[in-house]
Amino acid sequence: MTTYRRRISKWWPQSLREATLSIPQWFPKTAVFTSPREAAMAFPYLQQPSFLLASLKADSINKPFAQRCQDLVKVIEDFPAKELHAIFPWLVESIFGSLDGVLLGWNLRCLQGRVSPVEYSIAMEFLDPGGPMMKLVYKLQAEDYKFEFPVSYLPGPVKASIQERVLPDSPLYHNKVQFPPAGGLGLNLALNPFEYYMFFFALSLITQKPLSGTLHVRTSDCAYFILVDRYLSWFLPTEGNVLPPLSSSLGGTSPSPAPRTPAMPFASYGLHHTSLLKRHISHQTSVNADPASHEIWRSETLLQVFVEMWLHHYSLEMYQKMQSPHAKESFTPTEEHVLVVRLLLKHLHAFSNSLKPEQVSPSAHSHATSPLEEFKRAAIPRFVQQKLYLFLQHCFGHWPLDASFRAVLEMWLSYLQPWRYAPEKQAQSSDGQARCVSERWAPFVQENLLMYTKLFVGFLSRALRTDLVSPKNALMVFRVAKVFAQPNLAEMIQKGEQLFLEPELVIPHRQHRFFTAPTFTGSFLSSWPPAVTDTSFKVKSHVYSLEGQDCKYTPMFGPEVRTLVLRLAQLITQAKQTAKSISDQYGESAAGRPFLSWLGFYPSDTNSSYSTNDLDEMGQDSVRKTDEYLEKALEYLGQMFRLSEAQLAQLTLALGTTQDENGKKQLPDCIVGEDGLILTPLGRYQVINGLRRFEIEYQGDSELQPIRSYEIPGLVRVLFRLSSAINHRFADQMVALCSRADFLGSFCRYHLMEPTLSSRHLLSPVGQGRSAGCVRGPRLSLRFLGSYRTLLSLLLAFFVASLFCIGPVPCALLLVLGYFLYAMAMALLTERGKLHQL
């Protein structure tokens, strides 16, 4: 027994090693096993898959992460596919988490190399496209195993379509739907190992919620984000061909799955729907797929899984319903989700642009080309365009009006500029201006017309509702204006609009749908239709396929959009002036504050209407950046829409931004009603955007105003109780002293009487009617002693006095005497001022 246990391989899981204690007595004790597989074959009762699964589950709790991965690598290498297929679903779930989000898995979305370098390197090596996990996938793929995936966890439109017995438009789901038996719980998809792995990997971005303590993790540094980039680079290569699958343990390569898509008519949302059951049975004709297409089946699957899981959360019908203001959101993407989609789009542009120039031309398309070249040409228009458009439309309409929209904006702009990811870089112009967009990209612009025009209008509507004084919002307007102002891009967009608005003379009305509905046979790409030479037809087909046959198109360079651009120009001009006024206020307040304010003891201005603006937090540098962004944005918009300086000047005057005689900002536009001032729509607009404001100041009881940040809360409350007790005890004596007409009366009135409300600047007519009833008698206020500033001044005075050998008591007497002289002078000046007013 001892000899056998010593010769068992070190990797053997602890539970399996303990199980060897029950070895039959008849077995030779001198036996030596060269591999774990021989040991397992020697003991049939040890090779049950359930036993291996239970052992790995136990080790996942008891062993450290590094040791578990090492054990998994050896299990994958030494065990046959028959035993590995039982642990595969559990292993995938333990890595990416459960579909319901309860199990977190390895938490790849928060795993970073600089925080956990050991775990990060181990996880990345294990999940690498050429790593052990993919070797397990290909090992199971060679045996044609299938794994069930519940339909209930698919994106909303796909789930609804399948549950209604309608086959989704994506070939990814064809011939995979399994109906439950009698008494079954629900529909499932029968997926091969590669599909099953990628489904879980893609959905973990959505189903797994980050921990509360990891909200500020940088997405681009996380293991999940880097794995997405590695998978895209491996399966969608920009140079060379897709690498073949890894060799299995038997020395062969993993074959591609059988032809999955029989000859059946394509059905998209918005067309007639036939029964899924009817299609599943009556259309199961035997089809021999093109053998050459097998080399890219993993690339096709990867792209479709990513697009379906990350983008296909909105159908055309759902998008049209979401236009209603009472519609309820079905799915809300996160900022991390958007960043990963942007990575996908950038790589797809690089992947599609890696076609050689002779392969891009229509003549080359008619000749025999490899499946990978066909896939590069068709990847974006066929699999990505429609779902991305609906995804962006939802984000533009429902994303919060804050700086986090920058992620959506950059994703959109990345898609609009495929020339940025082309292998050949356009040379910068000699005068330092932006690069001219080549005519080579005119077909892309025309076939993605709505991506440019409809979404630009959506951005305008957002920009008109944001605070452009904020540097982050100003930067977003600048970015959009800069991209659209690239030389020759506006002309391409105008040309595309002209092609769409051309009257239909020959093309039948219903052919627009037919163009977007090719027939699938064999591989996903074998039925890609030949290039359509009619450019106008292609543009119309693009618009109708994304917006529906009855869409109402608003030209980007038409009068309606031009009016919105002029309004945005107004806001930009106003925001520049507002930023300048804030900068002036900031400089004046900073210059007027005493030295102690730099220590945080100077009272803050609680009446400022700009206290929540991030300019106050970032200072003068933010004002400079905001002014630069807005100035360039206004310049770019003027170039695009040919706005003259005279037009901009008229718009500025029309909004009423001129200053009054004193150089101060006017009040917001309002009218006088029965209960006071009432803001007009223009006034509300001015207040919301920080263009004008009311001068608000506290006019209540000074003793009851909220405790300020420069006061000690506990001390203020004690002083209030003390002063209230004194006022209650000596109220009559205070009234008598303040009623005297001599110097003592003036001295007491200066200290015990507050300024009457009639002497204050009242902004509302309501306050004037109530001011008569708000007369307060004389009282003592000790609240000033609860200020940090006052206490620090006293301590500083005692410290300076000690330097001149003056003790605390003489110093206190000197302070009292000095204040007494100051108070006498102020009392006399106050009385004389009142006499002059009379």
Image (tube, grey):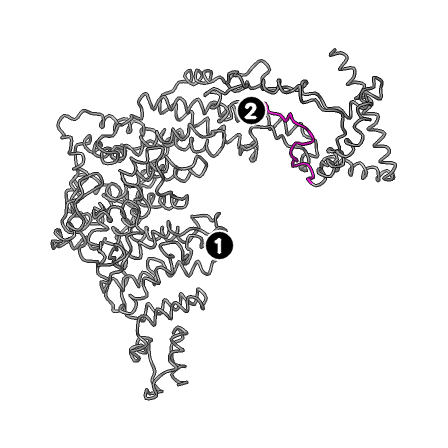
Q: Is residue 121 above or below residue 782?
A: below
- In x, y percent, where is residue 382? 23, 42
- Helix, strand or loop at label 1? It is loop
How many residues crowd around disc 2 within 10 Å: few (fewer than 14), some, or many (20 or more)? some
315 vs 636, left or right, is left
Q: Which mark is residue 581?
A: 2
587 drawn magenta: no
Q: Which mark is residue 734?
A: none
User: Which residues are drawn in magenta?
Assistant: 695-713
Could you say which is closer to the camera, residue 821 or residue 615?
A: 821
Circle 1: residue type:
Arg
In percent of the image, x 49 and y 33: which residue is there?
471
87 vs 675, left or right, is left
* Mark 1, residue position: 114
Check if mark 1's residue and mark 2's residue have beta carbons within 8 Å. Answer: no
Q: Is residue 118 above or below residue 440?
A: below
